Amino acid sequence: MEVFRPSIAQSPKSPDGQASDNTKVTDSKTAVAERSGKSTLNEGIANFYDESSGLWESMWGEHMHHGYYPKGAAPKSNQKAQIDMIEEVLSWAGATSATKMVDVGCGIGGSSRHIARKFGCTAQGITLSPVQAARGNALAKEQGLGEKASFQVADALQQPFEDNSFDLVWSMESGEHMPDKARFVGELARVCMPGGRIIIVTWCHRNLEQGETELKGNEKLLLDLICKAYYLPEWCSINDYRAIFEAEGLRDIKVADWSQEVAPFWGAVIKSALSTQGFSGLFKAGWTTIKGALVMPLMSTGFSMGLVKFNLITGVKS
């Protein structure tokens, strides 16, 4: 089973037991390269959402995530399906109340405001996109939640919050953007209060079968194409997330695969992109958004072949 853990490099020592100068130089260059790579990824993510969020909101509303379409249920609007997703996730996780919540990768704050109204709690959200943060704050004010919900630009891997700040830590479809899954979960656990609940809803690749050490070649190729369009680093499985939750000492861990429940979503998104409003909006939004739209059928293909999974994981901080 693949497991994402922080790597700890062992530096060669000089005779006096100290790291050699050459090693220090190499380590410094490696650190700079890693920071540069992370910065480039973060800039790509921020630009993608700066450019595309307005179009998404105009066509889909304030909730920038999948909808929930259980098999056999009556037809409903995609906007209703997105709200149902929040409600169903909370119910599945056993989250019945909160006093302070944080939305990590908040988009324009749809989940935060919904949960703030539902539980009467305060909500803070972080995103890499200045456009999203500004729009989230504007919507909070318009909806009478200006004193309850606030949004800011910040990195999920280095959150600007004190330890033990929130009793509900929420991440709806942002984990896939995280280049270091272990550090991501570590930060969620750090800002969570003891007894507080962490909920992650994210895209994953399928779990590896017994005897497999990696995904198949065609699966890797498909994920690579998706990653380039959506500014995603390497994918992981829900088993990887479970292992990280366990390593963080979280308890009452539960996972789920809701791929079938969200399957109708991508067809609806593709249909909306092909509409007159969609074509016009994509043209105005720019090439980055157009690239994302062109790759939508690949996401749908990934779902169909069982490679791309829509997974949930929750746990409680001890």
Image (tube, rainbow, N blue to C red):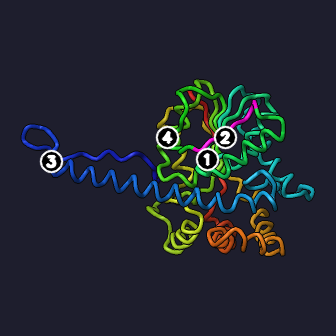
Principal secondary structure, stretch drawn in magenta: strand
Q: CA distance from mark 2 to mark 3?
A: 44 Å
Residue holding disc 1: 127
Give left or right: position of 181 versus 78.
left
Do labels 2 and 1 touch, CB within 8 Å? yes
Q: Label 3 amino acid?
A: Asp
If you read the primary sequence from the N terminus, does the residue marked by circle 3 or circle 1 appear first?
3
Residue 254: image quadrant is top right
Q: Secondary structure at mark 4?
A: loop
Crowd rating for badge 4 (residues with CA inside 10 Å; few <14, some 14–19, many 20+): few
Q: Secondary structure at mark 2?
A: strand
Q: CA distance from mark 3 to mark 4?
A: 29 Å
Which tag is nearer the camera, tag 2 or tag 4? 2
How many numbered marks, from 0 up?
Answer: 4
Residue depicted at 45% across the width and 50% down the height? 3
Q: Secondary structure at mark 1?
A: strand
Residue depicted at 40% across the width and 45% down the height? 6
Q: Label 4 amino acid?
A: Gln
Q: Label 2 amino acid?
A: Phe
Residue 19 image offset from top left, x and y in percent = 17, 43
Residue holding disc 3: 21
Magenta stretch, residue numbers: 147-153
150 drawn magenta: yes
Compare residues 240 and 178 and report the one nearer the observer: 178
Residue 44 image offset from top left, x and y in percent = 54, 61
